[in-house]
Image (tube, grey):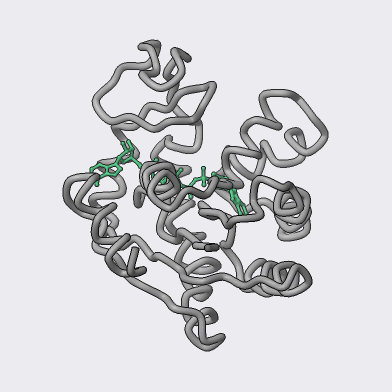
Amino acid sequence: MIIVLFGKPGAGKGTQAPLLAAKLAVPTLATGDVLRAATRAGTPLGLEAKGFMDRGELVPDKVILGIVAEELKKPEYARGAILDGVVRTVPQAEGLRSMLASLGRAVDAVLAFDVDNDEIVRRLGGRTVCENCQTPYTGREVGSVCSNCGGRLIRRKDDDPEAVRNRLRVYDEQTAPVLDWYQRDGTKVAVVNAVGAVHDVTARALTTIGA
Ligand code: AP5
């Protein structure tokens, strides 16, 4: 099963991805996580991506499609994947469709997490993430310890208010049209109310895809 997780920055994609992955027994692929790991490692990919990410802009389509092509070839994705933030422009959606078609596969459903901008600003204003495994937290201080891997919690540079404003603008202009594209393409698109307890949101998401 290949599921695309879609939604504004801070909508809860990174929170929901591992919960859905555990339930559906498939791995997750998050382009944001791949890019941050490359940035930390100081690879050419990371150096190219860093400026875009810090400003809250999108990394060029060619770079993203290169990452996705490389990842989806790996055997661990043979049973499917939860794609977290992997598709943010129409050219990326088109590129992913061709890539999957060449493997005899297709996106099964798009889960679009719906949250208003005031809640997004509140969530990202209070978020810390593990610098190692990227798990997001609310209400935990910078420097405290990740419950998942023991790593240190940090603030993401793109959670600064100006970058958040830019990310929301970029979402409206470049990412929101992707939902219409999927609908026109005949892919199942399910809008999930992403406000409420985390496990309730997971349950709603699973219900919409019949899992
Ligand atoms: P990425 O890391 O994917 O960032 P994003 O899409 O902006 O999403 P976030 O990770 O900020 O939020 P989220 O939806 O995962 O929410 P979370 O679960 O953390 O990408 C970063 C950058 O990389 C992009 O800006 C771009 O530059 C680049 N990039 C990546 N992919 C790309 C692509 N395909 N094309 C081009 N560029 C790309 O939750 C947020 C907070 O809310 C947390 O504190 C969490 O604890 C809390 N929370 C979660 N659920 C709930 C709930 N139900 N109630 C209350 N609080 C909640």
Ligand number 1: quarter of image: top left
Residue appearing at x 41%, y 59% in the figure:
7
Q: Residue 99: which quarter of the image?
A: bottom right
The image shows residue 20 at horizontal and vertical percentages of: 39, 50
Looking at the image, the residue that sits furthest to the left is 196
Of the 4 image quadrants, the one containing the C terminus is bottom left
Q: Nearer the viewer, residue 105 or 66?
A: 105
The image shows residue 129 at horizontal and vertical percentages of: 42, 27
Judged left or right of residue 31, residue 170 is left
Residue appearing at x 48%, y 51% in the figure:
166
Looking at the image, the residue that sits furthest to the right is 44
The image shows residue 106 at horizontal and vertical percentages of: 62, 72
Count of numbered badges drawn on the protein = 0
The image shows residue 45 at horizontal and vertical percentages of: 78, 38
Judged left or right of residue 104, residue 203 is left
User: Does residue 125 sit above or below 121 in this rendering?
Assistant: above
Residue appearing at x 79%, y 29% in the figure:
43
Q: Nearer the viewer, residue 45 or 174?
A: 45
Judged left or right of residue 77, residue 198 is left
User: Does residue 166 sit above or below 129 in this rendering?
Assistant: below
